[in-house]
Amino acid sequence: MIINHPLLGPRDAQEFTYLGDASLIDRPDWSAEDANEQYYAYAYLRDNPAGLHRELWFHEQGDRSWLVVTRNTLTHEITRVELASDVARLAGRSR
Amino acid sequence: MNQPNRLAGGQIDRSKQLTFRFDGKTYAGHQGDTLASALLANNVRLMGRSFKYHRPRGAFTAGSEEPNALVELRSGARREPNTRATIAELFDGLEAQSQNRWPSLAFDAMGINDLFAPFLTAGFYYKTFMWPKAFWEKVYEPIIRRAAGLGRLSMQPDPDAYDKGFLHCDLLIVGSGPAGLAAALTAGRAGARIILADEDFALGGRLNAETFSLGDSNGPHWVAATLAELEAMPNVRIMPRTTIIGAFDHGISGAVERVSDHLLAPLPGKPRQILWRIYAKRTLLCAGATERPIAFGNNDRPGILLGGALRAYVNRWAVTPGKTAAIFTNNDDGLRTASDLMAKGIAVAAIIDTRSQGTRIEGANHMFGARIVDTKGRLGLEGIVVRKADGQTQTIPCTTLGVSGGWNPNLHLTGHQRGRPVWNDAIASFVPGDCPPGMTVAGAANGQMSTAAALNGGAQQALTLLNDLGFATSSPELPQAEDAEIRLSPLWHVPSGKARAWLDLQNDVTVKDVKQAHQENFRSVEHLKRYTTMGMATDQGKTSNISALAIMAELSGQSIPDTGTTIYRPPYTPVSIGVMAGRSTDGHFRPTRLTPSHKWAQEQGASFVETGMWLRAQWFPRPGETHWRESVDREVLATRGSVGLCDVTTLGKIDIQGSDAATFINRVYCNGFAKLAVGKARYGLMLREDGIVMDDGTTARLAETHFVMTTTTVNAVAVFRHLEFCRQCLWPDLDVQLISTTEAWAQYAVAGPNARKLLQKLVDPEFDISNDAFPFMGCGEITICGGLRARLFRISFSGELAFEIAMPTRYGDALIRKLMAAGKEFDVTPYGTEALGVMRIEKGHAAGNELNGTTTAHNLGMGRMVSQTKDSIGAVLSRREGLMREDALRLVGFRPLNNQDPLKAGAHFIAGTNPEAATHDEGYMTSVAYSPNLGHAIGLGFLKDGGNRLGETLRAVNPLGGDAVAVEVVSPHFIDPQGERLRG
């Protein structure tokens, strides 16, 4: 597989480490009233789509960027690659 | 040496005679021969015994699809079983042995299996060896394994090297027949970077095996001229002896190049084979087609070949399997074989044509509407029994037979990403359906069976692909070539009474087996395959799958496409494990990391242990010590008695800087870090988000915005990855930067009551390291030995007064020698990981055995460290009720009631007189050691509600070993429980 790194261009998937669903970016607020339930869902519940899947890959043998890769789980076609930090900021994460 | 079956002509180099041995006999062949063609030249038709029935078999094909002629090639450590004689390139000194026969190929005692054939039909194993159950492993399987078989492994390490490599191109062309060469010419002239790969050692594909004209030239001449032009192009890489084994994601193909298989041994410095990963923008599959047989009674005798293979032997290699031939065909391609044989002076006794009429060859004996129903001969073909159109049977003597049932496109690679082929009535076979992205197909692989269609198809596809890629192109001039139709009338098998009609020659599957599978309702292709083992041999049914499918379709009254087709998976042909491993063998399987003191430790005769990828000194034996425990006990006592040194470089070090560094660290450790003062270090406990402990270590604050975190040796990489995740994905705007400095600093623990005195001899006088100025958990940047940069941390894993001193790695060797020299007056003692382990167990410090991925801070007795007042990774879920139960497992110490008893890690605790059963399990022992300070074994372990059970007696049981030890539950702090020593 080839992942088109937004900064470095096409790189072999061997250079990366896979983590999983990009929803791991959406870490809940620890002080929320229902924090327990939110964290339970965050830690354990995942969708397992047959089709497009946004997932986290780490360029461990490269520049150490965490990427959000949109991959079709049926065909392995990769339609989008973004810096996870950009995705996180768009989702409202900051400090 | 005489080669009785060698003909005139061919593409062998007669000036180069090669000598080889087969089953101990010496023969001669020529450069350009395969082992099979050379054996046939020497009138050796019998080359092997079949897998199950030990039937005599010979070469059936002239290519990689060969099911029969499998031999053991070479000898000694290079002996390679199941090598196909049809593609093994002949070299001088080649040695080959037939396999699966005893005592000899001509007389095989296991041939008796053939007489038991009625009992050995499809599903035989499933039905016969069911009872008694224990007999399967002990009796049945060993016997079957001995009787049914392939070649023998050498059982020695492979002496050759294998490599891996990466290639990039615009266009990968798979196969160098007419389609592939036409495509290569088109793309090469357009300036595209192309790779032209072919599994054969001679490029040209079928053009090397045919006699028809190509323009005003012939096949081999046109191939030579085309290759000469391609070879002169810098943008073209031609790779003979290279099989494309799989089509993977994103245009990546796997290729095995057999660099040295055609040599007696690899040339110095050259690998045996290379596994290439080819990144191609486009891939053009021009893999040609594989002929299929028609099944009839006893159609497996040596001398019976596929028609196109027989023609290839005659034309390309100038050999014939027999002086008198016959042809059995259902299409015009069979006629081509007949006329080529006749042109070479081989008598063609009859052309048995299943069609009722057709083209005639002058002077040939055509038998239209006829079928072969049986054959004669024992170790080779002697004659065929023909049932003529009028129903009469006639026996015709012949020693070779070419069978032509039509050609199946080699579309395997198109299916490697689940693409399903589609049925084509014109050729009665499957043609490519959906291809992997970036792949297209041309020539016979695409069902275009004539040479003219292949040439034009290859060129046209190349033009389309090049235009896609933005190259300016023009069509090459292609030679005029035959464009004949093959006029196929499908026929899959001839009903042959009692005589067995073979489909899968390698796995000995017959038409009757398919019928039986149908009768017993194993009708889907996947069931048929598994029930009969059809297509499951090393040839993967390349010559037999479609026929079996057609017969199943016939039986079930369905069309062939409705019956299905199997999914093709990589590899296309068998691949050696060696080339998959490449250089990753033995010690090269993964890197070995050496500590800065490694050379010095070797000089001391240290024994080493692998931790992570590091080699760490385990203990340092001294003369007279005969058991490792003597060394370890001495090291522990000497450290606690005076001072010891240990290389702790392998612990992960992460440099953390930025104005938000403290905030960041405070969030990744569950205990508080925000208020850590500059010049101080603190123990940190890191949780996973699910509340389980991930790692621990100390983090030192060197400056307001500068921290150094340590991790355990094995978790260094995972923790760094996790911190980057937190930094980039969770808090992208925190001003914090991370870098791993594990290998940048050499670090030694200096532990024991004399640790400070020793260090004071090295540390420059302007740095005060007295207890007041540099107390427990102090840290700072210092200089030693007159201005050399170093870092000092007053941290202790041993429980003694201890420091860790770090210097840039290049000083590591000098530093250990300096410390040893300076410590001489204190009898300084280097200690290894064993003594380190003993001392940390004596202190009750948790390590990898306790941080085992299932334990929480609460389990470890550190529950109160998890801050309630801040956000940190894992804090919320660590407080789950189930994890915080009072009777949860708690870390406690254990000692044997009887001082002589050893303890075992992994033992489980059982209370009172309860039976040794999982329902009574109360926890388990994680770490044990012999404490030379206490004079008995000690252990750490997790016990339910352990904190409230001090003083209780339990059994530590080891059901695997059948032993149990009575232990007392004690505090995990065996030595200096108040921690007075480390503050001294």
Image: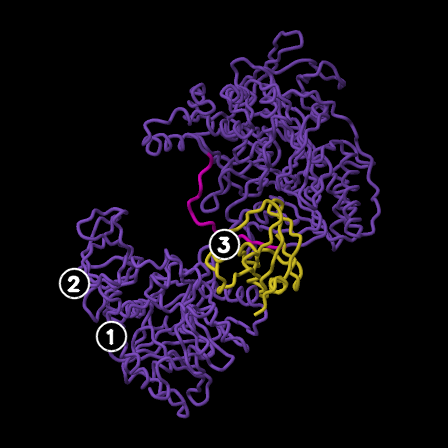
Chain colours: A yellow, B purple
Majority secondary structure of the magenta segment?
loop
Outermost residue, front side: A33
Per the image, label 2 sits on a secondary structure element best described as loop
Q: Of tags 1 and 2, which is closer to the observer?
A: 1
Q: Nearer the viewer, residue A36 or B746?
A: A36
- Mark in front: 2 vs 3: 3
Disc on res. B899: 2
Q: Are marks 2 and 3 in contact (CB under 8 Å)?
A: no
Left/right of residue B761 with respect to residue B732 in the rendered view:
left
Q: Residue at x 55, y 49 (%)?
A: A47
Q: Is residue B239 above or below residue B49?
A: below
Asked if the residue under mark 2 is in contact with the one under mark 1, i.e. CB atoms within 8 Å, the reply is no
Q: Which residue is mark 3?
A: A41
What residue is disc 1 on?
B976
Q: Nearer the viewer, mark 3 or mark 1?
A: 3
Disc 1 residue type? Asp
Q: Where does the image place residue B594, in percent across and percent down from the top left?
A: 43, 68
The 10 Å Cα crowd at callout 3, few under 14, some 14 to 19, many 20 or more, is few
Tell me if mark 1 has few (under 14), some (14-19) or many (20+) residues whose alpha carbon lies within 10 angstroms of its own. few
Q: Amino acid at mark 3?
A: Ala
In the rendered structure, does residue B160 fall within the stretch colored magenta?
A: yes
Residue B613 at least partly seen = no
Q: Is residue B975 above or below residue B390?
A: below
Q: Is residue B497 in the magenta section? A: no
Q: Which residue is painted at 60% across and 12% down in the image?
A: B395
Q: Residue B95: which numbered mark, if any?
A: none
The three-letter code of the residue at mark 2 reads Asn
For the record, the magenta segment spans B150-166
SS for dot 1:
loop
Q: Residue at 19%, 69% (x, y): give it.
A: B934
Q: Are marks 2 and 3 on the same chain?
A: no
Q: Is residue B349 above or below residue B509?
A: above
